Amino acid sequence: SNTQVTLRTQTNLQQRQFYEDNGYLLIKNLVADEDIERFREEFVKICRNEVKVPAITIMKDITIAKSTADENTVTKLQDFMFSEELFRYCTLPQIVKYVECFTGPDIMAMHTMLINKPPDTGKKTSRHPLHQDLHYFPFRPADRIVCAWTAMQNVDRTNGCLVVLPGSHKGYLKEHKYPEWEGGVNKMYHGIYDFDKSLPRVHVPMEKGDTLFFHPLIIHGSGRNRTEGFRKAISCHYASSDCQYIDVKGSTQEYLEKEVEEIVRERYNMSVSALDFKVSMLFPPPFFFFFFLKSRHVQKRWGPVASLIRH
């Protein structure tokens, strides 16, 4: 009926306004239990080396990194774009429907993660410092990038739910560095160097299947996991196919580019000279190359972000 359409439109407008004002939007019960169970089973298979996924990164906490291979030693899978089962998450119609509101209809998946936050060993390394995701991305504009983050179980302050600083997405990209934490910090877990400590923080408890959509400039992080179980979530950063790569030299992201170069060399087993040759002769800098390799088309048109065109 007309009334239903009006209500639905009104709700969408309210949701959009909330996102514009706050930089995030929580949608309850978006992903079905059966899908989450399938993702969990695939995660276990990958951890046990029963399934081999090309180009995936299997990360371990610095305090448990030397342990054997099973799901209790893996803290995160990154770049699961070539796992057909896990990538199915990125293409779920109910997720893409919301993503499209922020990216437009032409969508690329740029960064994929399944996070298995471990019980903290007492050294507090399961924390993720406050950061902005745009720090990790060499493409723009920021307003055409969005993250979908789905809880694979109930998450709250005891097991390390997300914490956000509402409205902080209206600011600029801040300088990040490794925090000086006792107990150390995991690789690439950069934090914001300086921000307004008086800004209110909102913890976002979520139930299994709830999905948080958030802007890449919002300041956010997660607390440590004080329970005995692992806290699982699956996420994807999406960008409009029309996003374009930018040169980060001279910016706050420049040192990150060097870390990414090391990762590219390690992962693709390239010597320094081989990588430099390939990059200089065939490709833009490794930072672009890295995202070109780990992105995957989701729907509609391909564009600059899928073709390594720099502007």
Image (cartoon, grey):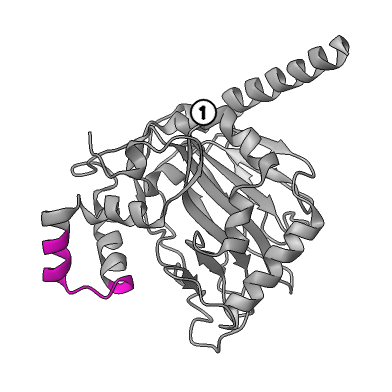
Quadrant hosting residue 115: bottom right
Q: Nearer the viewer, residue 165 or 45?
A: 45
Task: Decide whether the magenta segment is chiefly helix, strand or loop.
Answer: helix
Q: Is residue 208 left or right of residue 109?
A: right
Residue 193: tell me if it is visible: no
In the image, what residue occupies the spot 36% across and 52% down?
291
The region drawn magenta spans 266-278
Residue 184: tell me if it is visible: yes
Residue 51 image offset from top left, x and y in percent: 57, 78
Q: In this view, does 266 lie to the left or right of 284?
A: right
Residue 264 image offset from top left, x and y in percent: 29, 65
Question: Considering the image in quadrants, where does the N terminus appear?
Answer: top right
Residue pointed to by mark 1: 104
Q: Is residue 178 left or right of residue 37?
A: left
Residue 58 position (above or below residue 303): below
Residue 115 position (above or below residue 93): below
